[in-house]
Image (cartoon, rainbow, N blue to C red):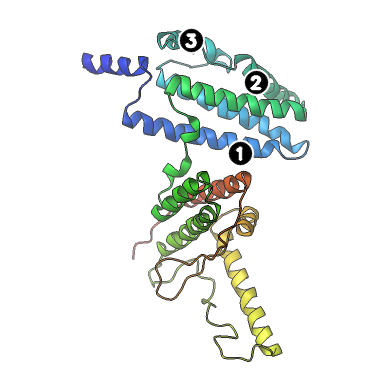
Amino acid sequence: MGYIVLYRNYLKKSKLLTIMEREVILRRLAFIKYLFTQAKNQSTLPDPLNASSVLMFHDAVELFLQLCAEELNVNTDNVSFMGYWEKLKPKLVELRIEELTQKEGMRRLNKARVSLKHHGILPSKSDINDFKVLTESFLIENSKNIFNIDIKEASLIELISYTKTKENLLIAKNSFEEKKFSNAIKHLALAFEFLIHDYESSKQGRFGQSPFFFGRDMTFLGSFSMGLDRSTKLSEFVDNVKESIESIQKAVKILSFGIDYRKYVKFSMLTPKPRWAIGSTEPIVSISNNAKISKEEFEFCFDFIIESALKLQEFDFEVSI
């Protein structure tokens, strides 16, 4: 048993992590990063809505401090936010790290949080922008110093249980980094389509029908499939009715899954709509080879899919037949 303790101490002093530790820490860092991303999004809202970002920046930092305490085996019962710096310092010195960085910046963030939460004093827009920069620096610097991990590596993708969704998200991420924007957009669309399809396919009642069934497939009920003259009013009416019913079916299904519909609308405006052919195991996505997507748009779509997947996993269920 003594050798295990010595080996663990060696790992910490050399700032190395075992595979299991790295997976656990990456998952925790991924959630912290997610909170920070949500705070960044809130910080762009108009006054006074942007003030809520201060609370979430603070939460992200506090969760990171707690993770550090657990990794360094430091008891933090009844410790204050700024008390973490003193509590962690002895262990950090053993790792040849002077202390956590951004101490004074985090003190400012903590004061702003107390002023907002307990006294209703709203932070200025410039202060909020400062806190965004300071929090990001805090997370990046200390992740590298303590865990030898770039927090940018941490992704909530690893928490997704839907295999095809996860695979397509990884392809989309790699494609975007390689500036293959059309391929990135295509696989974002596929990731979400598989998420909805696979979730619904796994939910069959005792009589073989999906609880998320909101009417028959209208794919082959257009004027062309029915052999109607495309120039007539009847043809136009049939196609309009088909399009309306399909839109209503999709909207009701998204809402029934508990997915944020407004975010879905934005996502659907940034990505093409996959189409399923009869008997096909994979949808078809048509997209121009010179399609573009900005970093902010890509991150929105990427985070939306992860958020939707985690929401579906939050209340997953099976029906015994």
Seen at 60% across and 44% down, the residue is: 295
- Contact (Cβ within 8 Å) of mark 3 with mark 1: no
State the mark number for residue 88.
none
Q: Residues within 10 Å of mark 1 (few under 14, many from 20)?
A: some
Seen at 63% across and 35% down, the residue is: 39
Mark 2, residue position: 110
C-alpha separation, residue under disc 3 versus residue under disc 1: 30 Å
Query: Above or below — where is 216 with respect to 29?
Result: below
**Label 2 vs 3, first from the N-terminus:** 3
Residue 57 is left or right of residue 23, and the answer is right
Does residue 171 appear in this view? yes
Q: Secondary structure at mark 2?
A: helix
Seen at 61% across and 26% down, the residue is: 135
Residue 212 is left or right of residue 268, and the answer is left
Mark 3, residue position: 89
Q: What quarter of the picture does the N terminus occupy?
A: top left
Residue 191 is left or right of residue 1, and the answer is right
Give amino acid for label 1. Gln
Q: Position of residue 134 (x, y in %)?
A: 63, 24
State the mark number for residue 38.
1
Query: Above or below — where is 224 with respect to 202?
Result: below
Q: Secondary structure at mark 1?
A: helix
Q: Secondary structure at mark 3?
A: helix
Q: Looking at the image, which is closer to me, 130 or 57?
A: 130
Q: Mark 2 vs mark 1: give the one in front.
A: 1
Give amino acid for label 2. Asn
> Image quadrant of residue 116?
top right
Give amino acid for label 3. Lys
